[in-house]
Image (cartoon, grey):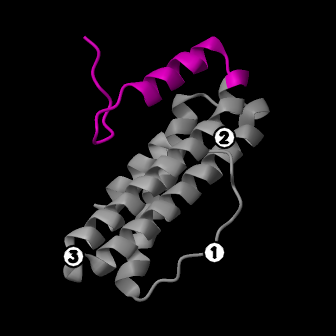
Amino acid sequence: MRTIVAVLASTLVIGSAFAEGPAKTSSGPAEARADAVRDQKVESHIKALHAELKITAAEESQWDNVAQTMRENARELDQAIDKRDAVVGNATAIDNLNSYADVAQAHADGVKKLAAAFSGLYSSMSDDQKKEADEDFGHRTHEGRKIAKE
């Protein structure tokens, strides 16, 4: 579930800030594997989006900013989810609501960062690339799947 949410967030979040935050420290092999799976899914999504948008050599530096933002957003969202998961078993209703709000806030912040990072790239794209980006980012269900056009 964490991975799905992280990938969804990375899909929706193309921000501008890309200061490297502190690395997440894994507390064990299972967490390290979960991080590796998340990272692999994010990288796969970045690669697929790069291909779908037909990023040109001239756009590559702006794309790198977008990709880095997606990676950071996935890590930050994952950290918020981990924090929630750590307390949810003993959480009161208020604790539960607050931890959910933290996850939602991490997602919202990530979306804003992604939009800021993507805006520069988007403005330099061809009309065909913009059309593809509009479809990729504008027609998604809650689960992140594309909505089929009729």
- Say which label, 2 or 1, has the lower sequence index: 1
Q: Looking at the image, which residue is at 41% across and 56% down?
A: 6
How crowded is the residue under tag 3: few (<14 C-alpha within 10 Å), some, or many (20+)? Answer: few
* For discs 1 and 3, the disc positioned in front in the rendered view: 3
Q: Is residue 67 above or below residue 106?
A: above
Locate residue 2 relative to residue 125 in the image: left or right. left
**Residue hosting label 3:** 92
Q: In which quarter of the image is residue 99?
A: bottom left
Report how far apart the C-alphas of labels 1 and 3 lie in the structure.
Answer: 29 Å
The amino acid type found where label 3 is placed reads: Thr
Query: What amino acid is labelled 1 in the image?
Result: Pro
| Residue pictured at 45% horizontal, 70% vertical | 79
Q: 10 Å neighbourhood of mark 2: few (<14), some, or many (≥20)?
A: many
Q: Dot 2 corresponds to which residue?
A: 117
Give the amino acid type for the residue marked by disc 2 in the picture.
Ala
Residue 25 in picture, x, y percent from top left = 52, 83
Please indicate, yes or no, whether residue 54 appears anywhere in the rendered image: yes
Q: Mark 1 points at which residue?
A: 22
On whether residue 132 falls in the magenta region, the answer is yes
Where does the magenta region start and end? 123-150
* Secondary structure of the residue carrying numbered label 2: helix
Q: In this view, does 132 lie to the left or right of 116?
A: left
**Residue found at the far bottom of this picture:** 28
Q: Residues within 10 Å of mark 1 (few under 14, many from 20)?
A: few
